[in-house]
Image (tube, rainbow, N blue to C red):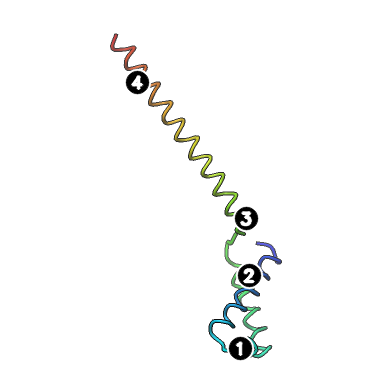
Amino acid sequence: MNQDNSDNLVNQFIKQFNQAFVPGAQALGDEVQMQMRSAMTSALQKMNLVTREEFDTQQAVLRRSREKLDNLEQQIAELEETLRQLNDK
């Protein structure tokens, strides 16, 4: 995850935190927000996170791979059946 994505995620979390748990976004002092931002940035950088775009791309690749695998399994089953029929003659 690059720095911009990490910063955006931290900013979004802090905004949602402020809206959900603190009446009025200014209730947390600047110092507390800076410490929270620093701690969250550090924690997020240690995680193996991907962007939504990267996730969606990999999900599409996996879906196509699964479809190809299903098709190949079907073709193998058909070939095995054909071989069985030939051997039975």
x and y percentages locating residue 83 in the rendered image: 36, 16
From the image, state whether disc 1 or disc 3 is nearer to you. Answer: 1
Left or right: 25, with 82 as reference point: right
x and y percentages locating residue 69 in the rendered image: 47, 35
Q: Which residue is mark 3?
A: 53
User: Looking at the picture, which amino acid does disc 1 mark?
Assistant: Gly
x and y percentages locating residue 49 in the rendered image: 58, 62
Q: Quadrant of residue 31?
A: bottom right
Which residue appears at 51% of the width and 43% of the height?
63
Q: Which residue is mark 4?
A: 81
Which residue appears at 37% of the width and 22% of the height?
80
Q: Which residue is mark 1?
A: 24
Mark 1 to mark 3 CA distance (whole Å): 32 Å
User: Looking at the picture, which amino acid does disc 3 mark?
Assistant: Glu
Q: Which residue is mark 2?
A: 9
Sequence order check: which comes first, mark 1 or mark 2?
A: 2
Residue placed most toward the observer, 62 or 45: 62
